Image: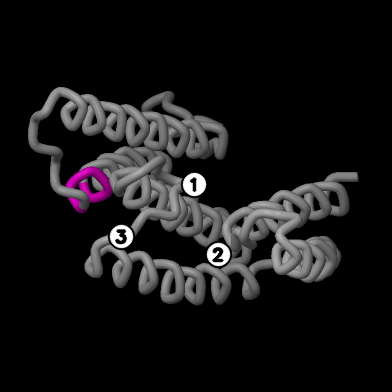
């Protein structure tokens, strides 16, 4: 549908997703730039700088797009607005957390190296407070079909934890396995959860 100037007012979530992906790619480039500076012996950019700059650019791009298609977004139901707000907000939380971890010592996301107290406290607050907000938005927006997919995925994720965790733990105590890695189990739960959720949502 076009307005009086001939420009389309119908918003496309493909563009929104593209903005999110471009923001994530820019974040990866920033992390690579910082790592190159460290390897060259130069001072690294402050840990907080990359998330702040990247998120600000992503929000600015998204804001311009929403403003351009404001009439189209106004036609959305409250449920649809809350749904996409929860997804975008969750994406921001994940991206900022990943960038903060990537700028830390060791191998970045999968490292168990020590973090500075400020980064650890910031990540903890970001995860707990951010997740509470995102889930509050999400649960106000979902319909019965998505709620069913969410519940099945949550159950599958629970099973993906309770089966391997005790086995890994007792094998470690017998020196038959390496120490239990909480983040490896967390990653497994997320993968199983996502796969089951997508199956029940789109089958």
**From the viewer's perspective, is 101 left or right of 33?**
right
Q: CA distance from mark 1 to mark 3?
A: 13 Å
Number of callouts: 3
State left or right for residue 160 relative to residue 48.
Answer: right
Seen in the picture, residue 64 relative to 32 is either above or below; the reply is below
Which dot marks residue 110?
Answer: 1
Per the image, label 2 sits on a secondary structure element best described as helix
- Which residue is denoted by mark 3 in the rendering? 115
**Residue at position x 50%, y 30% in the image:** 2
The span shown in magenta is 48-52
Q: Can you tell which mark lies on residue 65?
A: none
Q: Examine the rendering and report whether any part of residue 157 can be seen.
A: no
On screen, 49 above or below 169? above
Colour theme: one colour
Q: Which residue is mark 2?
A: 82
Closer to the eye: label 2 or 3: 3
């Amino acid at each position: 549908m076009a307005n009086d100037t001939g420009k389309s007012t119908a918003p496309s979530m493909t563009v929104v997703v593209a903005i999110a992906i471009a923001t994530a790619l820019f974040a990866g480039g920033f992390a690579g730039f910082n790592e190159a500076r460290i390897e060259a012996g130069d001072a690294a950019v402050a840990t907080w700088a990359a998330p702040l700059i990247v998120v600000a650019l992503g929000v600015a791009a998204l804001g311009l797009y929403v403003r351009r298609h404001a009439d189209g977004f106004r036609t959305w139901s409250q449920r649809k607005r809350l749904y996409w707000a929860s997804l975008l907000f969750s994406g921001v939380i994940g991206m900022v957390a990943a960038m903060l971890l990537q700028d830390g010592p060791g191998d970045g996301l999968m490292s168990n190296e020590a973090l500075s107290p400020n980064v650890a406290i910031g990540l903890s607050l970001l995860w707990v407070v951010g997740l509470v907000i995102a889930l509050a938005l999400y649960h106000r927006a979902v319909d019965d079909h998505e709620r069913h997919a969410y519940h099945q995925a949550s159950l599958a994720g629970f099973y993906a934890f309770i089966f391997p965790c005790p086995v890994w733990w007792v094998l470690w105590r017998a020196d038959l396995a390496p120490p239990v890695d909480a983040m490896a189990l967390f990653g497994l739960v997320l993968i199983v959860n996502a796969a089951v959720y997508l199956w029940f949502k789109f089958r």
